[in-house]
Image (cartoon, rainbow, N blue to C red):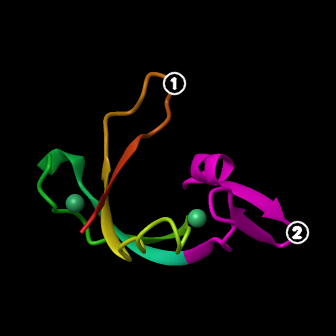
Amino acid sequence: MRMKWIADHCVSDGDFQLCKTCSSKVEIIGAYMSIHDPRFGDTCAGSGRVVRLVIPFCPHCETRPNEYGCLHELEPHWDGSIHLRVRFN
Ligand SMILES: [Zn+2]
Ligand SMILES: [Zn+2]
């Protein structure tokens, strides 16, 4: 999750990831995401399963991501990967 974001926005400094733009230390939050059933389309309904995701963000350049959101599974991709649509409440 957000590995591309890390590659695009961060420079590594030993144990820390620093923001490329402002050199602030990137913070990490744990977000709880409900998994919603694609059969209900855009409706937020599902089995009640929840996953915890780790989301890095720059406290200086970005607003703190919401710690609760949901994932909607999309049609399986041609290569077999599953694409998820992420929504933050
Ligand atoms: Zn939802
Ligand atoms: Zn920054």
Q: Residues within 10 Å of mark 2 (few under 14, many from 20)?
A: few
Q: Secondary structure at mark 2?
A: loop
Count of all numbered marks drawn on residues in the image: 2
In the image, residue 19 above or below residue 85: below
- Compare marks 2 and 1 and give the one earlier in the sequence: 2
Q: Is residue 13 left or right of residue 76?
A: right
Mark 1 nearby-residue class (10 Å; few <14, some 14–19, many ≥20): few
Name the spot of residue 35 as percent of width and height, x first. Answer: 32, 62
On the image, the x and y values in percent for residue 89 come to 24, 69
Amino acid type, callout 2:
Gly
Position of residue 23 relative to residue 84, above or below, is below
Q: Say which residue appears at 68% left-offset and 56% top-offset.
A: 20
**Going 41% across and 71% down the picture, which residue do you hit?**
63
Q: Disc number at residue 14?
A: 2
Frontmost residue, 1 versus 60: 60
User: Does residue 86 appear left or right of residue 52 in this picture?
Assistant: left
Specify the quarter for ligand 1: bottom left
Q: Position of residue 45 (x, y in %)?
A: 16, 62
| Furthest residue toward front | 22
Q: Is 27 one of the magenta-colored residues?
A: yes
In the image, is residue 43 above or below residue 60? Answer: above
The span picked out in magenta is: 1-28
Q: Which mark is residue 79?
A: 1
Q: CA distance from mark 2 to mark 1?
A: 36 Å
The image quadrant where one finds the N terminus is bottom right
